[in-house]
Image (spheres, rainbow, N blue to C red):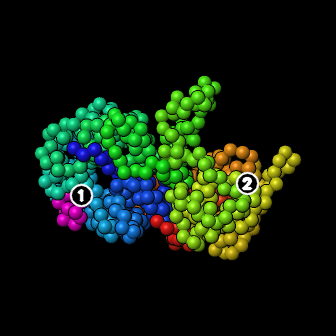
Protein backbone atom coordinates (compact mmCIF):
# COMPACT_ATOMS: atom_id res chain seq x y z
CA UNK A 1 0.00 0.00 0.00
CA UNK A 2 1.36 3.45 -0.83
CA UNK A 3 2.18 5.89 1.93
CA UNK A 4 0.53 8.95 0.36
CA UNK A 5 -2.76 10.22 1.81
CA UNK A 6 -4.86 12.20 -0.65
CA UNK A 7 -6.48 15.28 0.83
CA UNK A 8 -10.03 15.78 -0.44
CA UNK A 9 -11.28 19.19 0.61
CA UNK A 10 -15.04 19.64 0.90
CA UNK A 11 -15.10 23.16 2.39
CA UNK A 12 -17.01 24.38 -0.67
CA UNK A 13 -19.62 21.61 -0.42
CA UNK A 14 -20.10 20.05 3.03
CA UNK A 15 -18.47 23.11 4.65
CA UNK A 16 -20.74 25.50 2.82
CA UNK A 17 -23.73 23.48 4.09
CA UNK A 18 -23.03 24.65 7.64
CA UNK A 19 -25.47 27.26 8.92
CA UNK A 20 -24.45 30.70 7.73
CA UNK A 21 -21.47 29.60 5.67
CA UNK A 22 -22.92 30.80 2.36
CA UNK A 23 -20.21 32.05 0.01
CA UNK A 24 -20.66 33.89 -3.27
CA UNK A 25 -19.31 32.21 -6.40
CA UNK A 26 -16.41 34.70 -6.54
CA UNK A 27 -15.48 33.78 -2.96
CA UNK A 28 -15.71 30.08 -3.77
CA UNK A 29 -13.40 30.59 -6.72
CA UNK A 30 -10.89 32.40 -4.52
CA UNK A 31 -11.01 29.63 -1.90
CA UNK A 32 -10.55 27.00 -4.63
CA UNK A 33 -7.50 28.84 -5.97
CA UNK A 34 -6.00 28.99 -2.50
CA UNK A 35 -6.72 25.27 -1.91
CA UNK A 36 -5.00 24.41 -5.19
CA UNK A 37 -1.98 26.54 -4.24
CA UNK A 38 -1.82 24.74 -0.91
CA UNK A 39 -1.68 21.38 -2.70
CA UNK A 40 -5.00 19.64 -2.00
CA UNK A 41 -5.51 16.62 -4.26
CA UNK A 42 -9.28 16.89 -4.73
CA UNK A 43 -11.57 19.92 -4.42
CA UNK A 44 -15.24 19.10 -3.94
CA UNK A 45 -16.46 22.33 -5.49
CA UNK A 46 -20.18 22.01 -4.73
CA UNK A 47 -23.47 20.22 -5.27
CA UNK A 48 -24.45 21.33 -8.80
CA UNK A 49 -28.04 20.07 -8.61
CA UNK A 50 -28.72 22.22 -5.53
CA UNK A 51 -29.17 25.46 -7.49
CA UNK A 52 -28.09 27.16 -10.73
CA UNK A 53 -25.64 29.24 -8.65
CA UNK A 54 -24.00 26.10 -7.30
CA UNK A 55 -23.69 24.66 -10.79
CA UNK A 56 -22.16 27.88 -12.09
CA UNK A 57 -19.67 28.05 -9.22
CA UNK A 58 -18.56 24.45 -9.84
CA UNK A 59 -18.23 25.09 -13.56
CA UNK A 60 -16.08 28.19 -13.00
CA UNK A 61 -13.82 26.37 -10.57
CA UNK A 62 -13.52 23.41 -12.96
CA UNK A 63 -12.66 25.71 -15.87
CA UNK A 64 -10.15 27.92 -14.03
CA UNK A 65 -8.67 26.00 -11.10
CA UNK A 66 -9.00 22.67 -12.90
CA UNK A 67 -6.89 23.99 -15.80
CA UNK A 68 -4.10 26.12 -14.33
CA UNK A 69 -2.31 26.51 -17.67
CA UNK A 70 1.15 26.80 -16.10
CA UNK A 71 2.14 23.18 -16.54
CA UNK A 72 1.32 22.42 -12.91
CA UNK A 73 -0.70 19.26 -12.20
CA UNK A 74 -4.18 20.55 -11.39
CA UNK A 75 -6.27 19.19 -8.53
CA UNK A 76 -9.19 16.88 -9.31
CA UNK A 77 -12.43 18.90 -9.36
CA UNK A 78 -15.35 16.97 -7.95
CA UNK A 79 -19.11 17.60 -7.89
CA UNK A 80 -21.63 15.87 -5.62
CA UNK A 81 -24.76 14.10 -6.90
CA UNK A 82 -27.49 11.99 -5.35
CA UNK A 83 -28.02 8.64 -7.06
CA UNK A 84 -30.28 10.14 -9.72
CA UNK A 85 -29.79 10.79 -13.41
CA UNK A 86 -30.67 14.47 -13.08
CA UNK A 87 -28.14 15.07 -10.30
CA UNK A 88 -25.42 13.11 -12.08
CA UNK A 89 -25.96 15.04 -15.31
CA UNK A 90 -25.76 18.36 -13.44
CA UNK A 91 -22.59 17.23 -11.65
CA UNK A 92 -21.04 16.24 -14.96
CA UNK A 93 -22.01 19.58 -16.49
CA UNK A 94 -20.24 21.27 -13.59
CA UNK A 95 -16.98 19.31 -13.48
CA UNK A 96 -16.62 18.55 -17.18
CA UNK A 97 -14.40 21.57 -18.02
CA UNK A 98 -11.75 20.37 -15.53
CA UNK A 99 -8.82 18.43 -16.93
CA UNK A 100 -9.27 15.95 -14.03
CA UNK A 101 -13.03 15.73 -13.31
CA UNK A 102 -14.76 13.48 -10.77
CA UNK A 103 -18.41 12.74 -10.02
CA UNK A 104 -19.19 11.86 -6.40
CA UNK A 105 -22.50 10.07 -6.00
CA UNK A 106 -24.12 8.85 -2.80
CA UNK A 107 -27.09 7.01 -1.36
CA UNK A 108 -27.84 6.01 2.23
CA UNK A 109 -27.30 2.42 3.36
CA UNK A 110 -28.32 2.39 7.04
CA UNK A 111 -31.64 0.72 7.84
CA UNK A 112 -32.85 3.85 9.60
CA UNK A 113 -32.33 5.92 6.42
CA UNK A 114 -33.78 3.20 4.17
CA UNK A 115 -36.92 2.85 6.28
CA UNK A 116 -37.72 6.47 7.10
CA UNK A 117 -35.98 8.63 4.51
CA UNK A 118 -35.67 6.66 1.29
CA UNK A 119 -38.49 4.15 1.86
CA UNK A 120 -36.52 1.64 -0.16
CA UNK A 121 -35.52 -1.98 0.41
CA UNK A 122 -31.88 -3.05 0.52
CA UNK A 123 -32.30 -4.74 -2.86
CA UNK A 124 -33.66 -1.52 -4.38
CA UNK A 125 -30.68 0.42 -3.01
CA UNK A 126 -28.23 -2.04 -4.56
CA UNK A 127 -30.02 -1.77 -7.91
CA UNK A 128 -29.93 2.02 -7.75
CA UNK A 129 -26.21 2.01 -6.97
CA UNK A 130 -25.42 -0.30 -9.89
CA UNK A 131 -27.48 1.81 -12.30
CA UNK A 132 -26.27 5.24 -11.15
CA UNK A 133 -22.60 4.48 -10.56
CA UNK A 134 -22.59 2.85 -14.00
CA UNK A 135 -24.24 5.93 -15.51
CA UNK A 136 -21.78 8.30 -13.82
CA UNK A 137 -18.88 6.18 -15.05
CA UNK A 138 -20.23 6.28 -18.61
CA UNK A 139 -19.77 10.07 -18.43
CA UNK A 140 -16.71 10.59 -16.27
CA UNK A 141 -13.46 8.61 -15.92
CA UNK A 142 -13.41 9.04 -12.14
CA UNK A 143 -16.39 8.14 -9.96
CA UNK A 144 -16.52 8.25 -6.19
CA UNK A 145 -19.31 6.41 -4.40
CA UNK A 146 -20.43 7.03 -0.78
CA UNK A 147 -22.82 4.83 1.22
CA UNK A 148 -24.29 7.60 3.37
CA UNK A 149 -24.51 6.83 7.10
CA UNK A 150 -22.01 3.99 6.65
CA UNK A 151 -21.09 4.38 10.33
CA UNK A 152 -24.55 3.05 11.30
CA UNK A 153 -24.97 0.60 8.41
CA UNK A 154 -24.86 -3.19 8.67
CA UNK A 155 -21.26 -4.04 7.63
CA UNK A 156 -22.39 -7.14 5.67
CA UNK A 157 -24.77 -5.01 3.60
CA UNK A 158 -22.02 -2.41 3.12
CA UNK A 159 -19.66 -5.03 1.66
CA UNK A 160 -22.36 -6.01 -0.88
CA UNK A 161 -23.13 -2.40 -1.85
CA UNK A 162 -19.44 -1.53 -2.21
CA UNK A 163 -18.70 -4.65 -4.25
CA UNK A 164 -21.52 -3.76 -6.65
CA UNK A 165 -20.35 -0.12 -6.84
CA UNK A 166 -16.86 -1.30 -7.76
CA UNK A 167 -18.25 -3.62 -10.42
CA UNK A 168 -20.30 -0.73 -11.83
CA UNK A 169 -17.18 1.41 -12.17
CA UNK A 170 -16.51 3.31 -8.91
CA UNK A 171 -12.84 4.25 -8.56
CA UNK A 172 -12.96 5.69 -5.02
CA UNK A 173 -15.12 4.35 -2.19
CA UNK A 174 -15.82 6.88 0.50
CA UNK A 175 -16.98 5.70 3.93
CA UNK A 176 -18.89 8.46 5.73
CA UNK A 177 -19.66 8.55 9.42
CA UNK A 178 -22.46 10.92 8.49
CA UNK A 179 -23.78 11.58 11.98
CA UNK A 180 -20.45 11.38 13.86
CA UNK A 181 -21.60 8.34 15.83
CA UNK A 182 -18.67 5.94 15.78
CA UNK A 183 -15.61 5.75 18.03
CA UNK A 184 -12.08 5.54 16.60
CA UNK A 185 -11.82 1.83 17.40
CA UNK A 186 -15.12 1.04 15.69
CA UNK A 187 -14.38 3.22 12.67
CA UNK A 188 -10.90 1.71 12.20
CA UNK A 189 -12.44 -1.77 12.39
CA UNK A 190 -15.11 -0.76 9.85
CA UNK A 191 -12.40 0.22 7.34
CA UNK A 192 -10.35 -2.90 8.08
CA UNK A 193 -13.49 -5.06 7.63
CA UNK A 194 -14.24 -3.40 4.28
CA UNK A 195 -10.69 -4.10 3.12
CA UNK A 196 -10.93 -7.76 4.18
CA UNK A 197 -14.40 -8.50 2.84
CA UNK A 198 -15.03 -6.44 -0.31
CA UNK A 199 -13.93 -8.13 -3.53
CA UNK A 200 -12.16 -5.67 -5.87
CA UNK A 201 -11.41 -3.11 -3.14
CA UNK A 202 -7.67 -3.52 -3.69
CA UNK A 203 -8.01 -1.65 -7.02
CA UNK A 204 -9.83 1.33 -5.48
CA UNK A 205 -8.93 4.14 -3.12
CA UNK A 206 -10.71 3.95 0.24
CA UNK A 207 -11.71 7.34 1.55
CA UNK A 208 -12.97 8.45 4.98
CA UNK A 209 -15.43 11.24 5.72
CA UNK A 210 -16.21 11.91 9.39
CA UNK A 211 -18.49 14.35 11.17
CA UNK A 212 -17.71 15.80 14.56
CA UNK A 213 -20.93 15.35 16.56
CA UNK A 214 -19.03 13.69 19.41
CA UNK A 215 -15.79 15.60 18.82
CA UNK A 216 -14.21 12.45 17.35
CA UNK A 217 -13.93 13.38 13.67
CA UNK A 218 -10.15 13.78 13.56
CA UNK A 219 -9.55 10.71 15.73
CA UNK A 220 -11.89 8.63 13.54
CA UNK A 221 -10.25 9.89 10.35
CA UNK A 222 -6.79 8.98 11.65
CA UNK A 223 -8.09 5.55 12.74
CA UNK A 224 -9.49 5.03 9.23
CA UNK A 225 -6.18 6.04 7.65
CA UNK A 226 -4.32 3.73 10.03
CA UNK A 227 -6.61 0.90 8.87
CA UNK A 228 -5.76 1.53 5.21
CA UNK A 229 -7.82 4.48 3.92
CA UNK A 230 -5.74 6.66 1.59
CA UNK A 231 -8.05 9.63 1.10
CA UNK A 232 -9.27 11.92 3.90
CA UNK A 233 -12.28 14.18 3.36
CA UNK A 234 -11.85 17.38 5.35
CA UNK A 235 -12.77 21.06 5.54
CA UNK A 236 -10.85 24.18 6.49
CA UNK A 237 -11.49 25.05 10.17
CA UNK A 238 -13.66 21.90 10.36
CA UNK A 239 -16.76 23.75 9.16
CA UNK A 240 -19.67 21.60 7.96
CA UNK A 241 -23.10 20.20 8.75
CA UNK A 242 -24.05 20.51 12.46
CA UNK A 243 -20.85 20.13 14.52
CA UNK A 244 -18.81 20.13 11.34
CA UNK A 245 -16.45 17.86 9.43
CA UNK A 246 -12.94 16.68 10.17
CA UNK A 247 -10.65 19.68 9.92
CA UNK A 248 -7.96 19.68 7.26
CA UNK A 249 -5.38 21.35 9.47
CA UNK A 250 -5.73 18.77 12.25
CA UNK A 251 -5.33 15.72 10.02
CA UNK A 252 -2.51 17.19 7.96
CA UNK A 253 -0.58 18.40 11.01
CA UNK A 254 -1.10 15.12 12.88
CA UNK A 255 0.41 13.21 9.95
CA UNK A 256 3.17 15.81 9.60
CA UNK A 257 4.06 16.18 13.28
CA UNK A 258 3.85 12.44 14.03
CA UNK A 259 5.51 11.35 10.80
CA UNK A 260 7.65 8.67 12.52
CA UNK A 261 4.48 7.09 13.95
CA UNK A 262 2.28 7.16 10.82
CA UNK A 263 4.96 7.06 8.10
CA UNK A 264 2.47 8.75 5.79
CA UNK A 265 2.75 11.92 3.68
CA UNK A 266 0.37 14.44 2.16
CA UNK A 267 0.97 16.95 -0.63
CA UNK A 268 -0.03 19.93 1.52
CA UNK A 269 2.18 22.99 1.86
CA UNK A 270 1.52 23.41 5.58
CA UNK A 271 2.76 27.02 5.62
CA UNK A 272 -0.46 28.04 3.84
CA UNK A 273 -2.79 26.59 6.46
CA UNK A 274 -3.23 29.78 8.49
CA UNK A 275 -3.95 31.86 5.44
CA UNK A 276 -6.66 29.46 4.26
CA UNK A 277 -8.15 29.41 7.74
CA UNK A 278 -8.45 33.19 7.79
CA UNK A 279 -9.76 33.38 4.23
CA UNK A 280 -12.56 30.87 4.94
CA UNK A 281 -13.40 32.51 8.25
CA UNK A 282 -13.57 35.94 6.62
CA UNK A 283 -15.78 34.77 3.77
CA UNK A 284 -18.18 32.68 5.84
CA UNK A 285 -18.29 34.95 8.89
CA UNK A 286 -17.69 31.83 11.01
CA UNK A 287 -15.16 32.85 13.63
CA UNK A 288 -12.50 30.31 14.64
CA UNK A 289 -12.68 29.53 18.36
CA UNK A 290 -9.51 30.80 20.11
CA UNK A 291 -8.59 27.36 21.48
CA UNK A 292 -9.08 25.58 18.14
CA UNK A 293 -6.19 23.20 17.42
CA UNK A 294 -3.60 24.51 14.93
CA UNK A 295 -5.42 27.66 13.75
CA UNK A 296 -6.97 29.13 16.92
CA UNK A 297 -5.60 32.45 18.16
CA UNK A 298 -4.28 30.73 21.29
CA UNK A 299 -2.86 27.64 19.56
CA UNK A 300 0.69 28.99 19.98
CA UNK A 301 0.15 31.36 22.92
CA UNK A 302 1.78 30.63 26.27
CA UNK A 303 0.25 32.32 29.27
CA UNK A 304 1.26 30.39 32.37
CA UNK A 305 4.54 31.53 33.94
CA UNK A 306 5.95 28.00 34.08
CA UNK A 307 5.19 27.54 30.38
CA UNK A 308 6.73 30.88 29.43
CA UNK A 309 9.83 30.03 31.43
CA UNK A 310 10.07 26.66 29.68
CA UNK A 311 9.61 28.25 26.25
CA UNK A 312 12.37 30.75 26.91
CA UNK A 313 14.70 27.88 27.81
CA UNK A 314 13.72 25.65 24.88
CA UNK A 315 10.87 25.94 22.37
CA UNK A 316 10.19 22.19 22.39
CA UNK A 317 9.27 22.22 26.09
CA UNK A 318 5.73 23.33 25.26
CA UNK A 319 5.46 23.43 21.47
CA UNK A 320 5.21 20.30 19.34
CA UNK A 321 5.18 22.26 16.08
CA UNK A 322 6.78 25.50 15.02
CA UNK A 323 4.18 28.24 14.42
CA UNK A 324 5.91 29.03 11.13
CA UNK A 325 5.18 25.48 9.89
CA UNK A 326 1.48 26.35 9.66
CA UNK A 327 2.13 29.89 8.47
CA UNK A 328 1.70 31.69 11.78
CA UNK A 329 3.81 34.72 11.16
CA UNK A 330 6.71 35.41 13.46
CA UNK A 331 6.87 38.88 11.92
CA UNK A 332 10.26 38.12 10.40
CA UNK A 333 10.06 41.08 8.07
CA UNK A 334 8.10 44.12 9.06
CA UNK A 335 7.25 46.68 6.47
CA UNK A 336 6.76 50.32 7.28
CA UNK A 337 6.06 53.68 5.74
CA UNK A 338 9.39 53.77 3.91
CA UNK A 339 8.88 50.41 2.25
CA UNK A 340 8.36 50.57 -1.50
CA UNK A 341 6.10 48.78 -3.94
CA UNK A 342 8.76 46.19 -4.69
CA UNK A 343 9.22 45.24 -1.03
CA UNK A 344 5.46 44.92 -0.65
CA UNK A 345 5.19 42.75 -3.77
CA UNK A 346 8.05 40.49 -2.60
CA UNK A 347 6.52 40.04 0.85
CA UNK A 348 3.08 39.27 -0.60
CA UNK A 349 4.65 36.69 -2.91
CA UNK A 350 6.46 35.10 0.03
CA UNK A 351 3.06 34.84 1.70
CA UNK A 352 1.67 33.05 -1.38
CA UNK A 353 -0.28 36.05 -2.69
CA UNK A 354 0.46 36.82 -6.33
CA UNK A 355 -1.37 39.94 -7.40
CA UNK A 356 -1.33 41.39 -10.87
CA UNK A 357 -0.27 45.00 -11.38
CA UNK A 358 -3.73 46.59 -10.99
CA UNK A 359 -4.47 44.71 -7.77
CA UNK A 360 -0.99 45.47 -6.46
CA UNK A 361 -1.48 49.19 -7.17
CA UNK A 362 -4.67 49.16 -5.12
CA UNK A 363 -3.11 47.27 -2.23
CA UNK A 364 -0.01 49.51 -2.31
CA UNK A 365 -2.17 52.62 -2.07
CA UNK A 366 -4.00 51.16 0.97
CA UNK A 367 -0.71 49.95 2.43
CA UNK A 368 0.72 53.49 2.32
CA UNK A 369 -2.39 54.89 3.98
CA UNK A 370 -2.12 52.24 6.69
CA UNK A 371 1.61 52.84 7.17
CA UNK A 372 0.85 56.50 7.87
CA UNK A 373 -1.27 55.43 10.84
CA UNK A 374 0.64 52.33 11.98
CA UNK A 375 4.39 52.22 12.49
CA UNK A 376 5.07 48.65 11.44
CA UNK A 377 3.03 46.45 9.13
CA UNK A 378 3.19 42.73 9.88
CA UNK A 379 2.07 39.80 7.72
CA UNK A 380 -1.25 39.59 9.56
CA UNK A 381 -1.89 43.27 8.69
CA UNK A 382 -1.17 42.56 5.03
CA UNK A 383 -3.52 39.58 5.03
CA UNK A 384 -6.28 41.68 6.57
CA UNK A 385 -5.62 44.46 4.08
CA UNK A 386 -5.77 42.13 1.08
CA UNK A 387 -8.91 40.44 2.44
CA UNK A 388 -10.73 43.68 3.02
CA UNK A 389 -9.61 45.47 -0.15
CA UNK A 390 -9.53 42.71 -2.75
CA UNK A 391 -11.68 39.84 -1.63
CA UNK A 392 -14.99 41.60 -1.13
CA UNK A 393 -16.68 40.20 -4.17
CA UNK A 394 -19.98 42.07 -4.41
CA UNK A 395 -20.01 45.80 -4.03
CA UNK A 396 -23.53 47.20 -4.25
CA UNK A 397 -22.87 49.79 -1.51
CA UNK A 398 -19.41 51.14 -0.63
CA UNK A 399 -18.54 53.19 2.44
CA UNK A 400 -17.66 56.71 1.30
CA UNK A 401 -17.58 58.54 4.63
CA UNK A 402 -18.25 58.04 8.33
CA UNK A 403 -18.32 60.31 11.35
CA UNK A 404 -19.27 59.32 14.87
CA UNK A 405 -19.76 61.14 18.15
CA UNK A 406 -19.77 59.03 21.28
CA UNK A 407 -18.57 58.94 24.87
CA UNK A 408 -20.12 59.65 28.26
CA UNK A 409 -21.44 63.12 27.50
CA UNK A 410 -24.23 62.55 24.99
CA UNK A 411 -26.05 60.25 22.66
CA UNK A 412 -23.90 58.09 20.39
CA UNK A 413 -24.53 59.43 16.91
CA UNK A 414 -23.22 58.35 13.52
CA UNK A 415 -23.37 59.94 10.10
CA UNK A 416 -22.75 57.57 7.21
CA UNK A 417 -22.24 58.33 3.52
CA UNK A 418 -22.57 55.40 1.11
CA UNK A 419 -22.00 55.16 -2.62
CA UNK A 420 -24.62 52.86 -4.11
CA UNK A 421 -26.90 52.26 -7.08
CA UNK A 422 -28.68 55.59 -6.36
CA UNK A 423 -25.40 57.52 -6.10
CA UNK A 424 -24.15 59.11 -2.87
CA UNK A 425 -26.53 58.94 0.09
CA UNK A 426 -26.10 60.31 3.61
CA UNK A 427 -27.97 59.35 6.78
CA UNK A 428 -27.46 60.02 10.48
CA UNK A 429 -28.76 57.94 13.39
CA UNK A 430 -28.58 57.65 17.17
CA UNK A 431 -27.85 54.30 18.82
CA UNK A 432 -26.89 52.57 22.05
CA UNK A 433 -23.24 52.91 21.03
CA UNK A 434 -21.25 54.09 17.99
CA UNK A 435 -21.51 50.76 16.13
CA UNK A 436 -25.25 50.53 16.74
CA UNK A 437 -25.68 54.13 15.56
CA UNK A 438 -23.58 53.51 12.44
CA UNK A 439 -25.50 50.31 11.60
CA UNK A 440 -28.81 52.14 12.01
CA UNK A 441 -27.62 54.85 9.62
CA UNK A 442 -26.53 52.17 7.12
CA UNK A 443 -29.94 50.46 7.48
CA UNK A 444 -31.70 53.75 6.73
CA UNK A 445 -29.90 53.88 3.36
CA UNK A 446 -29.73 50.22 2.34
CA UNK A 447 -33.12 49.14 3.70
CA UNK A 448 -32.43 45.39 3.64
CA UNK A 449 -34.40 43.63 6.37
CA UNK A 450 -32.00 41.60 8.49
CA UNK A 451 -31.08 40.49 11.99
CA UNK A 452 -27.53 40.77 13.26
CA UNK A 453 -26.67 37.28 14.52
CA UNK A 454 -23.02 37.68 15.39
CA UNK A 455 -20.55 40.50 15.76
CA UNK A 456 -16.96 39.84 16.71
CA UNK A 457 -14.00 42.14 16.87
CA UNK A 458 -10.35 41.58 17.56
CA UNK A 459 -6.97 43.18 17.03
CA UNK A 460 -4.88 41.74 14.17
CA UNK A 461 -1.59 42.41 15.93
CA UNK A 462 -0.48 43.73 19.30
CA UNK A 463 -0.09 47.43 20.03
CA UNK A 464 -2.31 50.45 20.37
CA UNK A 465 -2.10 51.16 16.62
CA UNK A 466 -3.24 47.64 15.65
CA UNK A 467 -5.70 47.01 12.85
CA UNK A 468 -9.12 46.01 14.15
CA UNK A 469 -10.78 43.08 12.41
CA UNK A 470 -14.55 42.69 12.49
CA UNK A 471 -16.58 39.66 11.41
CA UNK A 472 -20.38 39.75 11.28
CA UNK A 473 -23.15 37.35 10.37
CA UNK A 474 -26.60 38.56 9.45
CA UNK A 475 -29.82 36.72 8.71
CA UNK A 476 -32.20 37.88 5.98
CA UNK A 477 -35.72 38.71 7.17
CA UNK A 478 -39.07 38.89 5.36
CA UNK A 479 -37.96 37.05 2.27
CA UNK A 480 -34.94 39.32 1.62
CA UNK A 481 -32.11 37.32 0.08
CA UNK A 482 -34.16 34.17 0.00
CA UNK A 483 -33.64 31.92 -2.99
CA UNK A 484 -36.50 29.83 -4.39
CA UNK A 485 -35.03 26.60 -3.01
CA UNK A 486 -34.86 28.14 0.46
CA UNK A 487 -38.43 29.40 0.27
CA UNK A 488 -39.47 25.78 -0.20
CA UNK A 489 -37.44 24.48 2.73
CA UNK A 490 -38.14 27.54 4.87
CA UNK A 491 -34.42 27.81 5.64
CA UNK A 492 -33.28 31.26 6.82
CA UNK A 493 -30.41 32.67 4.80
CA UNK A 494 -27.35 34.00 6.59
CA UNK A 495 -24.45 35.99 5.20
CA UNK A 496 -21.00 36.69 6.58
CA UNK A 497 -18.98 39.88 6.24
CA UNK A 498 -15.47 40.94 7.12
CA UNK A 499 -13.77 44.33 7.50
CA UNK A 500 -10.45 45.60 8.81
CA UNK A 501 -9.27 49.11 9.62
CA UNK A 502 -7.28 50.96 12.27
CA UNK A 503 -10.59 52.56 13.21
CA UNK A 504 -12.83 49.84 14.65
CA UNK A 505 -16.08 51.64 13.80
CA UNK A 506 -14.96 51.88 10.16
CA UNK A 507 -14.03 48.16 10.26
CA UNK A 508 -17.46 47.40 11.74
CA UNK A 509 -19.28 49.28 9.00
CA UNK A 510 -17.15 47.65 6.27
CA UNK A 511 -17.97 44.20 7.67
CA UNK A 512 -21.68 44.98 7.88
CA UNK A 513 -21.72 46.33 4.31
CA UNK A 514 -19.89 43.24 3.03
CA UNK A 515 -22.62 41.03 4.52
CA UNK A 516 -25.44 43.32 3.31
CA UNK A 517 -23.99 43.37 -0.20
CA UNK A 518 -24.10 39.58 -0.30
CA UNK A 519 -27.70 39.64 0.91
CA UNK A 520 -28.63 42.15 -1.80
CA UNK A 521 -26.93 40.12 -4.53
CA UNK A 522 -28.82 37.02 -3.30
CA UNK A 523 -32.13 38.82 -3.88
CA UNK A 524 -31.25 38.76 -7.56
CA UNK A 525 -31.93 42.51 -7.89
CA UNK A 526 -28.28 43.41 -8.27
CA UNK A 527 -26.91 40.49 -10.33
CA UNK A 528 -23.57 39.00 -9.45
CA UNK A 529 -21.49 42.09 -8.93
CA UNK A 530 -17.79 41.58 -8.45
CA UNK A 531 -15.00 44.04 -7.99
CA UNK A 532 -12.52 44.29 -10.82
CA UNK A 533 -9.82 43.70 -8.25
CA UNK A 534 -11.05 40.19 -7.48
CA UNK A 535 -10.85 39.24 -11.10
CA UNK A 536 -7.31 40.50 -11.35
CA UNK A 537 -5.88 38.42 -8.52
CA UNK A 538 -3.73 35.88 -10.32
CA UNK A 539 -4.25 32.23 -9.48
O1 LIG B 1 -21.73 13.10 5.55
C1 LIG B 1 -22.03 12.50 4.51
O2 LIG B 1 -22.50 11.37 4.50
C2 LIG B 1 -21.82 13.20 3.25
C3 LIG B 1 -21.93 12.38 2.00
C4 LIG B 1 -22.63 13.11 0.92
C5 LIG B 1 -20.57 11.90 1.60
O3 LIG B 1 -21.49 14.36 3.24
ZN1 LIG C 1 -20.70 14.96 5.23
Mark 1 residue element: strand
Q: Is residue 67 above or below residue 314?
A: below
Which residue of the protein is positioned furthest toward the front in this rendering?
Answer: 313
Label 2 to label 1, Cα distance in Å?
52 Å
Between 191 and 24, which is closer to the camera in this rendering? 191
Which residue of the protein is positioned furthest toward the top in this rendering?
Answer: 306
Between 3 and 421, which is closer to the camera in this rendering? 3
Which residue in the structure is indicated by mark 2?
374
Q: Position of residue 432 (x, y in %)?
A: 75, 48
Q: Is residue 217 visible?
A: no
Mark 2 residue element: loop
Q: Is mark 1 within 8 Å of ligand 1?
A: no
Please report the bounds of the magenta region as a residue range: 132-142
Q: Position of residue 443 (x, y in %)?
A: 67, 61
Q: State the quadrant of the N terminus.
A: top left
Between 162 and 295, which is closer to the camera in this rendering? 295
Q: Position of residue 86 (x, y in %)?
A: 27, 65
Residue 389, located in which quarter of the rendered image? bottom right
Residue 51, located in which quarter of the rendered image? bottom left
Between 365 and 121, which is closer to the camera in this rendering? 365
Q: Is residue 221 visible?
A: yes
Disc 1 crowd, CA 10 A, few/some/many (<14, 14-19, 20+): many
**Which one is closest to the eye, mark 2 or mark 1?**
2
Name which residue lies at 14% across and 39% down: 197
Q: In the rendered structure, does residue 137 fall within the stretch colored magenta?
A: yes
Which residue in the structure is indicated by mark 1?
143
Amino acid sequence: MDNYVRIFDTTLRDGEQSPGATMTSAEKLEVARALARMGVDVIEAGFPAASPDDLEAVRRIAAEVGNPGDGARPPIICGLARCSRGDIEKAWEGVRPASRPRIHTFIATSDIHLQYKLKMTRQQVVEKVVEMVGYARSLCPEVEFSPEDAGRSDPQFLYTVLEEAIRAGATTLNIPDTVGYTTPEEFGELIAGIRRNTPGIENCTISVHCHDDLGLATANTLAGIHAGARQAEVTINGIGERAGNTSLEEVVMALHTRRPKFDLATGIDTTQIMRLSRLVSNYTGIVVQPNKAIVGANAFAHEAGIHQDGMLKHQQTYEIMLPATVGVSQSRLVLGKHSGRHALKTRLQEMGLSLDEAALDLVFERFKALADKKKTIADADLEALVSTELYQPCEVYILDGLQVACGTMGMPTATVRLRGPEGLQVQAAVGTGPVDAAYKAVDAIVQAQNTLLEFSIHAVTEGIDALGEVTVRIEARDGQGTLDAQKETDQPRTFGGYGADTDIIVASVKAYLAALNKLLVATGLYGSIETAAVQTVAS
